[in-house]
Image: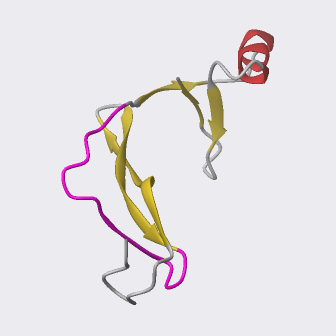
Amino acid sequence: MRCPHCGKRSVINHVTVRWNQVRGSFLPSRGHYCTACKTAFAAGGAERDFAFHSVRIDEMTDALRRLQQSADLIVVRHRSGTCEVLF
């Protein structure tokens, strides 16, 4: 596949080009990405195959730390200091 912007064949298909937050969930927008001109563009009809749900937490506990180490969830700390669990 050729990039519609630069015309080179450096396109990666079916990658997440953007995450959209909708009602406490992060939904992936899938598309194509050109490594030559560093441009993302829509795939045209790609379905959304999974979503993350998020919950804000007050502090990191040992149980959450063990779940994060086993890759069952992701704990994100924002610049504002708030923490959020993605699962």
Question: In the rendered view, would you say 35 is above or below 55?
Answer: below
| Residue 40 lies in the magenta-colored region | yes
| Residue 50 image-quadrant placement | top left
User: Could you say where residue 21 lies in the image, as x and y percent from the top left?
Assistant: 35, 43
Q: Which quadrant is home to the N terminus?
A: bottom left
User: Could you say where residue 53 lies in the image, as x and y percent from the top left?
Assistant: 43, 26
Side of 19 relative to 42 (left or right): right
Q: What stretch is highlighted in magenta?
A: 35-49
| Residue 23 lies in the magenta-colored region | no
Q: Which residue is drawn at 29% across and 32% down?
A: 23
Of the pair 31 and 9, the residue shown nearer to us: 9
Q: Main secondary structure of the magenta part?
A: loop
Q: Which residue is drawn at 80% across and 13% down?
A: 62
Question: In the rendered view, would you say 40 is above or below 47?
Answer: below
| Residue 33 image-quadrant placement | bottom left
Question: In the rendered view, would you say 63 is above or below 55?
Answer: above
Of the pair 70 and 63, the residue shown nearer to us: 70
Question: In the rendered view, would you say 38 is above or below 57?
Answer: below
- Spot the residue most to the bottom: 6
- Spot the residue most to the top: 63
User: Could you say where residue 29 lies in the image, as x and y percent from the top left?
Assistant: 34, 50
Q: Residue at x 64, y 53 (%)?
A: 79
Of the pair 57 and 76, the residue shown nearer to us: 76
Q: Residue at x 45, y 53 (%)?
A: 15
